[in-house]
Amino acid sequence: MFSQIFTQLIVYFRYWTISGSGLSLLFGLLWLLLYRPPLFKQPRLWLVMLGGALAGVLAVSIIQTPLSILLNKLWHEGAGLGRLLLVGLLSVVTLGLVQEGAKLVPLLVLRKRQGGQLDEQQGLSAGAVSGFGYGFLETFYVMNYLFISGWNWDVLANEYPALVLTSLERVCMLGLNMGLSALVGWGLAKGKGLRFFLLVAALHAFVAFISFLMANLNFPVVITELALMVIIIVLTVVMLSMRGEE
């Protein structure tokens, strides 16, 4: 188990390619331009972004990975559909709680450093950049892994679906991480942090469960991607409408 934890801890930084890194930066820049967090007016947001990345990596490696290993022991080849769905449900609930809890930590630290004060716009922006921190590391790993595993631009004409689907998924998941954390940051500023944390953890788990169904029960890829896009679009529109001007 310890070797798996260590592997998970370094996996985000293990692969480096020019194409994968460049696409990751492009996707990240697009989302930052859309949310326009006041990173230069409020320099503390850079620390929140870094905190979201580090807290996410540590939580996934030290908490989520061991829990996933234990949950996977409930499933074995030949087990019925009911057990598969139970394991999947427990796994995605764990994922939602761990990842969203990790991204919440920098917001709690920021609020404490400000004497317990956090206005709604700052909470939303801080949440967005905290979610961006971890979401970008996920995107960086996946896109670099795609290219390091043998995919290259020479096969684009014949194997472009792999790049399109992977890129679309990463753009959506980066936006999901930002939107969910922005929502919990806004809720935290309103004094309803726990309520909004449970809400975003449930939304995250729901998205993960759709992916689980696609991977294990041949759930249609098109339906999965469309469902994900609808959730991201609705969440992003809501968050941007609440952002206001800073």
Image (tube, helix red, strand yellow):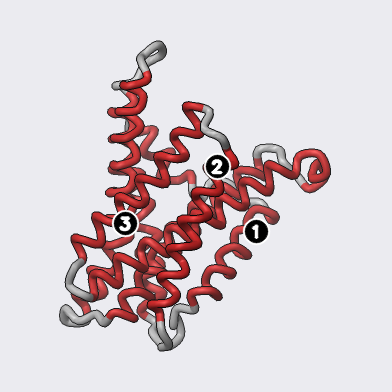
Q: Secondary structure at mark 2?
A: helix
Name the side, left or right, on which 64 lies relative to 17: left
Q: Quadrant of the C terminus?
A: bottom left
Q: Which residue is mark 2?
A: 223
Name the side, left or right, on which 30 lies relative to 214: right
In the rendering, at what x and y percent does residue 36 appear?
49, 79
Q: Which residue is mark 3?
A: 200
Q: Identity of the amino acid at label 2?
A: Ile
**In the image as oriented, which residue stretches furthest toward the top?**
78
Alpha-carbon span between mark 3 and mark 2: 22 Å
Which numbered disc covers residue 124? none
Alpha-carbon span between mark 2 and mark 1: 25 Å
Q: Secondary structure at mark 1?
A: helix
Residue 211 vs 21, above or below: the answer is above
* Residue closer to the observer: 64 or 3: 64
Q: Secondary structure at mark 3?
A: helix
Mark 3 vs mark 1, foreground winner is: 3
Asked whether the beta carbons under mark 3 and mark 1 sit within 8 Å of each other, the answer is no
Q: Identity of the amino acid at label 3?
A: Val
Q: Which residue is mark 1?
A: 23
Q: Identity of the amino acid at label 1?
A: Leu
In the rendering, at what x and y percent does residue 185 appear?
30, 69
Residue 19, image quadrant: bottom right
Alpha-carbon span between mark 3 and mark 1: 27 Å
In the rendering, at what x and y percent does residue 209 appear?
40, 39
